């Protein structure tokens, strides 16, 4: 279990809970020393809340039992201040260590106040307006009890058949990189402990926009030069702007799924770029490595994902 993974998970929770202790690292080390292995793994698990559903998984009616046993670190699709407050109270007051949950949601183009789709914003070429849109998004989402958004999507997409092209900034790498940085700065502001900011999650790492035939989840086959010159720069720009988290992609690259891709998650992201935040899988992407033919079963998929650098399992419950 890598210390830095849990460090980032816990520090995000504590920041959002407005912990003002100047000895934050000592506090986290103290908590980690008290944690069992099961509780550490629990911080790497994210499941659906009951407010909304993403993908084929359904709401887990037993998640409160899972939470109280220390086997849950994050909820996605838990919406509304009353609901998130009640669940957070349970996490803090009714679990052994009182570690707060991280609440995440796909806030793609506004919360309540609906903004143009990201592709439409990109067509303006107005970075300041795009940043202001992300600021508005963060204010509204934070007020609704969210800590974390699965945005911006920075995939370069050059095939108009791909339906998710609407979430990104189009086909140009330079413009996409500028917009990625603007959106991260708008969402996170200057201080993530402020109550009007939320953590960004840059997605989908990497090359999801190049899926063959523009078919979701499909294979990606390209040279390393094309990957580095065209598809990776917006992710690096988002990281340089301070992005706290990354999300893996559904696709595989040359036969290796992104969620278990050591070249992407370890070599490029950690070693070359020095990323010290945490990586979450896309929805169910850990177990989908089985469908890609890369993992034999759920156990193998879990080992591949965790050991490669996927620090949080979104929804599949494999971890």
Image (spheres, helix red, strand yellow):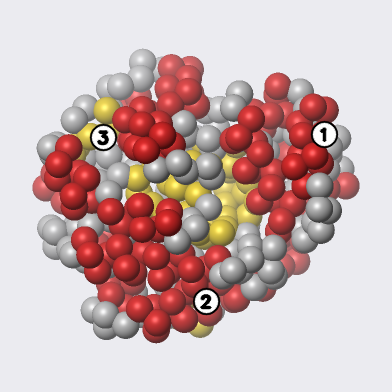
Report the residue marked by disc 3: 252
How far is disc 2 from disc 1 in space, using C-alphas?
35 Å
Which residue is at a point 36% across and 15% down the rendered structure image? 296
Mark 3 crowdedness (10 Å alpha carbons): few <14, some 14-19, many ≥20: many
Identify the residue under disc 1: 30
The answer to whether residue 294 is above or below residue 79 is above
Front tag of 1 and 3: 1
**Residue 121, numbered label:** none
Density class for disc 1 (Cα within 10 Å; few <14, some 14-19, many ≥20) is few
Residue closest to the eye, 302 or 54? 302
Position of residue 100 measured from the top left corner of the image (x, y, whole percent): 75, 48
Q: Nearer the viewer, mark 2 or mark 3?
A: 2
Q: CA distance from mark 2 to mark 3?
A: 33 Å
In the rendered image of this protein, does residue 267 appear above or below residue 61? above
Disc 2, disc 1: CB below 8 Å?
no
Q: Is residue 56 visible?
A: no
């Amino acid at each position: 279990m890598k210390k830095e993974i849990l460090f980032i998970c816990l520090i995000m929770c504590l920041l959002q809970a407005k912990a003002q202790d100047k000895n934050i690292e000592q506090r986290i080390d103290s908590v980690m020393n008290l944690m069992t292995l099961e509780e550490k793994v629990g911080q790497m698990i994210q499941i659906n809340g009951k407010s909304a559903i993403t993908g084929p998984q359904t709401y887990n009616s037993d998640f409160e039992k899972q939470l109280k046993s220390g086997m849950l670190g994050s909820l996605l699709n838990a919406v509304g201040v009353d609901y998130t407050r009640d669940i957070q109270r349970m996490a803090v007051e009714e679990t052994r260590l009182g570690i707060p949950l991280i609440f995440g949601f796909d806030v793609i183009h506004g919360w309540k106040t609906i903004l143009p789709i990201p592709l439409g914003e990109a067509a303006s070429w107005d970075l300041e307006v795009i940043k202001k849109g992300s600021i508005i998004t963060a204010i509204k989402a934070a007020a609704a009890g969210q800590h974390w958004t699965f945005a911006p999507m920075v995939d370069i997409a050059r095939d108009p058949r791909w339906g998710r092209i609407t979430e990104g900034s189009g086909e140009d790498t330079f413009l996409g990189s500028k917009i990625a940085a603007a959106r991260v700065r708008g969402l996170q502001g200057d201080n993530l402990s402020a109550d009007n900011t939320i953590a960004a999650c840059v997605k989908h790492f990497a090359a999801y926009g190049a899926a063959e035939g523009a078919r979701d989840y499909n294979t990606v086959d390209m040279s390393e030069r094309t990957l580095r010159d065209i598809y990776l720069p917006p992710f690096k720009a988002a990281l340089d702007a301070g992005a706290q988290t990354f999300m893996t992609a559904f696709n595989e690259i040359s036969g290796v799924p992104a969620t278990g891709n050591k070249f992407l998650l370890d070599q490029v992201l950690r070693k070359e770029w020095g990323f010290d935040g945490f990586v979450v899988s896309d929805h169910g992407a850990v177990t989908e490595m089985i469908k890609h033919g890369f993992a034999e079963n759920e156990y193998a998929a879990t080992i591949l994902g965790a050991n490669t650098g996927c620090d949080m399992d979104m929804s599949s419950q494999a971890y």
